[in-house]
Amino acid sequence: MKRYLAELYKKPDHHKKRFALLASGTITLFIFGAWSLAVFPPKADQPLSGGKNNDSNVSEVSPFQSIRMNLATSLEAIRNSFEELKVGLEAVDFEAEYKEMRDGALDTYGQ
């Protein structure tokens, strides 16, 4: 593999693009697989392949519901972060801070 990567720059552009597509596709599939296992873990009463389930009532969440819930949670967290930033910035006196920084810079450079 090291030899292939070392000589990849000598190959034509279409070969480089094909390699890039294959590499990015493999990485994307790996990330999607990890995400799907994290979001939709196999349940204890659900067989991994074939077989029959126990007849218990298990509420399923569709992928779109899961994405919607995750997106709503993420947007709420971002909104809360911006609100905290806004409150923090309101407490800062920028003019006084600027004057203090300016005076310190003038003292440093001897003007």
Image (cartoon, rainbow, N blue to C red):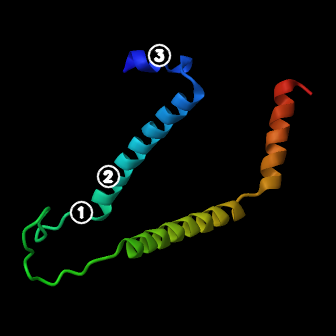
Q: Could you say which is closer to the camera, residue 67 or residue 95?
A: 67
Q: Position of residue 83 (x, y in %)?
A: 61, 68
Callout 3 amino acid:
Ala
| Gap between marks 1 and 3 measured at Cα | 40 Å
In the figure, 101 relative to 80: above or below? above
Q: Is residue 64 left or right of residue 96?
A: left
Q: Is residue 14 left or right of residue 32?
A: right
Q: Position of residue 102 (x, y in %)?
A: 84, 40
Q: Residue 45's quadrant in the figure?
A: bottom left
The residue identified by callout 2 is 34
Q: Residue furthest right?
A: 111
Callout 2 amino acid:
Ala
Mark 1: few, some, or many residues within 10 Å (few <14, many ≥20)?
few
Q: Position of residue 14 (x, y in %)?
A: 56, 31
Q: Are marks 3 and 2 in contact (CB under 8 Å)?
A: no
**Residue 41: image tag:** 1
Q: Could you say which is closer to the camera, residue 77 or residue 45?
A: 45
- Of mark 3 and mark 2, the one earlier in the sequence is 3
Residue at 42% x, 19% y is: 4
Q: Marks 1 and 3: which is nearer the front?
A: 3
Which quadrant, please, contains the N terminus? top left
In the figure, 21 relative to 40: above or below? above
Q: Is residue 111 left or right of residue 50?
A: right
Mark 3: few, some, or many residues within 10 Å (few <14, many ≥20)?
few
**Residue 6: image tag:** 3
Callout 1 amino acid:
Pro
Q: Could you say which is closer to the camera, residue 5 or residue 33?
A: 5
Q: Are marks 1 and 2 in contact (CB under 8 Å)?
A: no
Q: Are marks 1 and 3 in contact (CB under 8 Å)?
A: no
Q: Could you say which is closer to the camera, residue 24 or residue 108?
A: 24
For label 3, the SS is helix
